[in-house]
Amino acid sequence: MRVAIITNINKPKVRPALADLIPWVRQRVQVLGEETDTPLDLDKLDVDSVLVFGGDGTLLSTARRLKGRRIPLMGVNFGRLGFLASFSPEQFVQYFDAFVQGKLPISSRMQLEASVIDADVPCKLTDNAEVAEKRRFFSTALNDAVIAAGPPFRMIELVLGTDHDAGVRFLGDGLIVATPSGSTAYNVSAGGPILSPNVDAICVTPLCPHSLSFRPIVVGSQSKVMLVAKRVNKGTTLFCDGQANAALHIGDRIVVRKSPSDVLLVENPDAREWRTLAEKLNWAAGPRYNGPAAK
């Protein structure tokens, strides 16, 4: 097996671990590239898998850099939660040989594709080819595409529609469009629903809407989420996975749709969906009692 290794040396625990892990990996597979300070050209490197030592953020950026190539990512978590980078360093060592032998499950995760078209550029938003030709910004997102109001932090106004829907006017602090994988990230913090990773759908969750009746919705993955920026701040920005970004101006049109390319993730065989939610987010946790009743 040929692998590339991506490391986030800004994580305090990563650099000490590399001294032991990298030589151990090299004894078992062929390492064609190791990224620490100098970026690897992942969309051209001929490898069978990419090992990601860092956290979910490192894995998100690595997925985007693959540019649609279906190369499995094995994430080793040195961060906090580790939803996507699901292996601890100990579990990585335990299961790596099984992965090399093709015995670990690999899941296909939906990505989003976000495009921004300038206000003065004629474009039929339902035509994917025309959007691709005329957009000034494009990025994929494994977790979410987020429009944030930004400074001076006044409410912004968007028109939100899907496919051929004329759209509705929305006032608030922004909007989250999330994949099932990203439903447990910013989306759930904003009150959006949690979706199982194998559900083929998209979450649309408002940020502090100026209406109590504007609730999160779930649409089919074949729907295009189309937005028009009617009123924005100087700092209003579209963020993809909190990393790639584009400033938004009055009249800009944003199209978010399911990407034609999925991301392949090597799954931790010890992980269980509901247990992961309970352990990492305290989902469904019961009350904590104090005093004699707690015994």
Image (cartoon, rainbow, N blue to C red):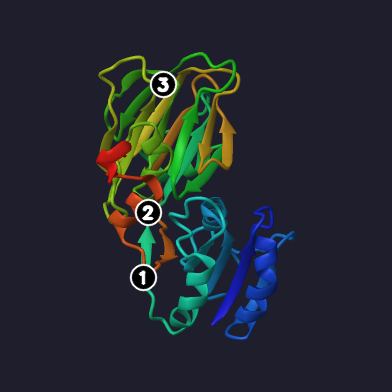
- Give whichever of discs 1 and 2 has the lower sequence position: 2
The mark tally for this picture is: 3
Q: What is the x, y in percent for residue 186? A: 43, 38
Amino acid at dot 2: Met
Seen in the image, is 64 located left or right of residue 104?
Answer: right
Q: Quadrant of residue 281?
A: top left
> Is 138 situated left or right of 290 in this image?
right
Task: Decide if residue 258 is in sight here.
Answer: no
Q: In what element is the residue under mark 3?
A: strand
Query: Would residue 279 appear left or right of 286 to someone viewing this image?
Result: right
Q: Is residue 294 visible?
A: yes
Residue 110 bears which disc, if any?
2
Residue holding disc 3:
158
* Image quarter (top left, top right, bottom left or bottom right) of the N terminus: bottom right
Instruction: Estimate how packed mark 1 is, as few (under 14), some (14 to 19) or many (20 or more) residues with alpha carbons within 10 Å.
Output: few
What is the residue that sits farthest to the front in this orientation? Answer: 292
